Image (cartoon, rainbow, N blue to C red):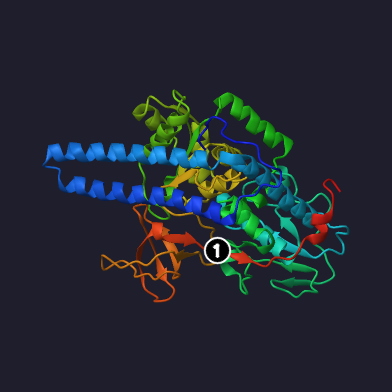
Amino acid sequence: MLQQADVTAERPPDFTPSLEFEQTRRLVEHGVQESWWYLSDQLSQLRKKLETYPDLLSHIDQILEEGADHTRVTQHDLMRLSQLDGLGTWREQEASDLSSLVQKRLHALQNPPDCSKAKKLVCNLNKGCGYGCQIHHVVYCFIVAYGSHRTLILKSRGWRYNKAGWEDVFQPLSETCTDPAGYTHSHWPGTNDTQVVDLPIIDTLSQRPPYLPLAIPRDISERLSRLHGDPAAWWVGQFLKYMLKPQPHTQQMLDSMAESLGFQRPIVGIHVRRTDKVGTEAAFHSISEYMNHVENYYARLALATPGVIKRVYLASDDPTVITEAQKKFPDYTFIGDPSIAKTAAVATRYTDASLKGIIADVHFLSLTDYLVCTFSSQVCRIAYEIMQTYHPDASSYFRSLDDIYYYGGQNAHNQRARFSHTPRRPDELALNPGDIVGVAGNHWDGYSKGVNRRTRQNGLYPSYKMEEIVDIADFPPYTEVDKRKSGT
């Protein structure tokens, strides 16, 4: 995320940091951030109560400013720590190796030796929702295909975004097997002997398998947990990497836009969702709220790269947002295409121009160095998931103004208490070390909300005392695929 001088030393090729070291380093990073969110929120609340005392207000503002600077310097040093003594080199290589392993497995799954005899999972693309929701629907189908060891057959003719289907925009999911026919056919879950199984949408799925998101495969879980701060997002990102390979004309469109927009790094991505979503799925957030986090990112980046040009890629379904941002923040270079925002309006959402626009927004947002958005938006979450495929670990390269990362229809998201907690307010949870808490959300003020599985109490709890529980599931072995040499 932060560009810096090369601090990586040579290490033996078999060098691997311990899982405990990597997890502890992330806990420190998490704790620093959560502590600052708590302190800044408390000081901001105190400031509101002291509005009639200008001298005190000035002093609180100074504490907030210097506290933010303290936090940025600490984060800068932690980022350097993650690259020292060969850790950066190891992380780059391990990320590449793990991705290659998964991509090879997906290719083998999607290209069976004999399509007429292969076990298949049929997925209908036409789920009645927007682009981000439909892409996540295909990912869900693909994960179930991987978990049931079936070739995914995507039925996309008549797709509401492109009547010609998926293959008119992206490359087919298989080079050799696209026929849904088979000698036996059943609805999910079928049996082990059923050749073709139809999969419903995740919302109506009965007999839910344990390998739905946020689960990751057991056979790569230790390597992935050592490498990455958000293993589930990395895992989803690998399916998107395989799925969203553009057709030549789609790639040409993206390349042409990158040149005309002057897309360069470093750059922060902002996704501002308005129109039909505000008031129903999401609250209104002003452009200033987004820019507060952009300014903090560039202040942090300036510690390593003074004088950097402050660029922002701004995507929105409201064409007035870019003009507003340029007017309010003249020291930033904003790039974006207002015509994309116009096609994102409800009346024109399912046109060819709209599809090109949303593909471009997701593409460029995922290529940014830091993402400021609302995770209630599927577009934002897809950009974050794809971002994981471009970096060894981009799990902290975002700031959501509302939800934490989640996957629609996911299995339970749990955290574990590392330390005890005695409630200081009636709405807080009591915690013992080892308590499991089902996460409902992060309030970004040092506290999260959830339910203590032991006491069944709902309430707030201090985020810095918790650790993530990585959901690990048994997927089918791909041993024979792993043994094959690359390219065979």
Q: Residue at x 68, y 52 (%)?
A: 158
Q: Which residue is denoted by mark 1 in the rendering?
A: 410
Q: Looking at the picture, how far across and down is residue 108, in whole percent?
A: 80, 54
Quadrant location of residue 476? bottom right
Residue 453 in sight from this viewpoint: yes
Q: Residue at x 69, y 48 (%)?
A: 99
Q: Looking at the picture, how far across and down is residue 153, in whole percent?
A: 75, 58
- Mark 1 nearby-residue class (10 Å; few <14, some 14–19, many ≥20): some
Asked if residue 292 is positioned above or below residue 217 in the image, the reply reads: above
Q: Looking at the picture, how far across and down is residue 459, in whole percent?
A: 34, 67
Q: Looking at the picture, how far across and down is residue 325, in whole percent?
A: 39, 32
Q: Residue at x 53, y 54 (%)?
A: 23
Left or right position of 16 against 111 = left
Q: Nearer the viewer, residue 434 or 326?
A: 434
Q: Amino acid at mark 1?
A: Gln
Asked if residue 31 is positioned above or below residue 423 in the image, the reply reads: above
Left or right position of 366 against 176 = left
Quadrant location of residue 419? bottom left
Residue 134 in sight from this viewpoint: no
Q: Nearer the viewer, residue 249 or 96?
A: 96
Q: Secondary structure at mark 1?
A: loop
Left or right position of 83 against 326 = right
Q: Nearer the viewer, residue 342 or 452?
A: 452
